[in-house]
Amino acid sequence: MGQIILGVGDYGASNRPGEEVKTFALGSCVSVILLDPKTRTVGMVHVALPEAAINKAKSLQKPGYFADTGIPALLNEMAKFGCQPKGKGMVVKLCGGANVMDTNDTFQIGKRNALSIKKVLWKYGMGAVAEDLGGNFSRTVTVSVDTGEILLSSPGRPNWKL
């Protein structure tokens, strides 16, 4: 069984049987998971910040780092597998967006990431059918290409599915 491991700001897709797409330790970051039932393709982007306007150079080097550039980049990647380039027919799920280090809730990066992602998805006529957002704990997310099943884990907690 192969794995595509995504770091912060990375995105990837697969439709290879037996493969998984995985990202570790989502704190305030949000994982956008796209599942295309027609092509049996799974895609994920690990979004760190809401808007590319704060660092245009970084958005060109690593578009997945920002919600407004990461989702279009993921859709383009999935189009290489025969998926609709505008996301038509895809199932959307979201994970992360926690408040792990900002104890006073000053910056609200997780909430801002989730809101920005939802705004970008709405522009494509897409919305999440399931989400596991917020809280004060990090999440590791694993998506199976074979089943589309999403398994989440966090230290000190039993694993759960989305």
Image: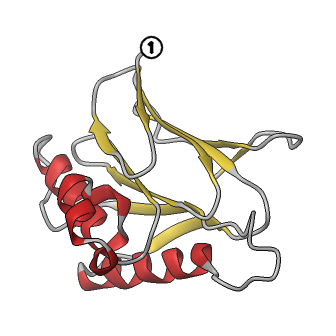
- In this view, 21 is above or below 93: above
Is any part of residue 41 visible from this angle?
no
Residue at the far right: name it. 156
21 lies left or right of 53: right
Residue placed at 21% from the left, 53% from the top? Answer: 61
3 lies left or right of 137: left
Q: Position of residue 117 (x, y in %)?
A: 41, 75
Q: Position of residue 21 (x, y in %)?
A: 43, 35
Give the tally of numbered discs.
1
Q: How is the image coloured?
A: secondary structure
Q: Position of residue 135 (x, y in %)?
A: 77, 68
Residue placed at 34% from the left, 22% from the top? Answer: 17
Residue placed at 40% from the left, 33% from the top? Answer: 145
- The quarter of the rendered structure image containing the N terminus is top left
Q: Residues within 10 Å of mark 1 (few under 14, many from 20)?
A: few
Q: 3 and 57: which one is in front? A: 57
Q: Position of residue 19 (x, y in %)?
A: 40, 24
Which residue lies under the disc numbered 1? 1
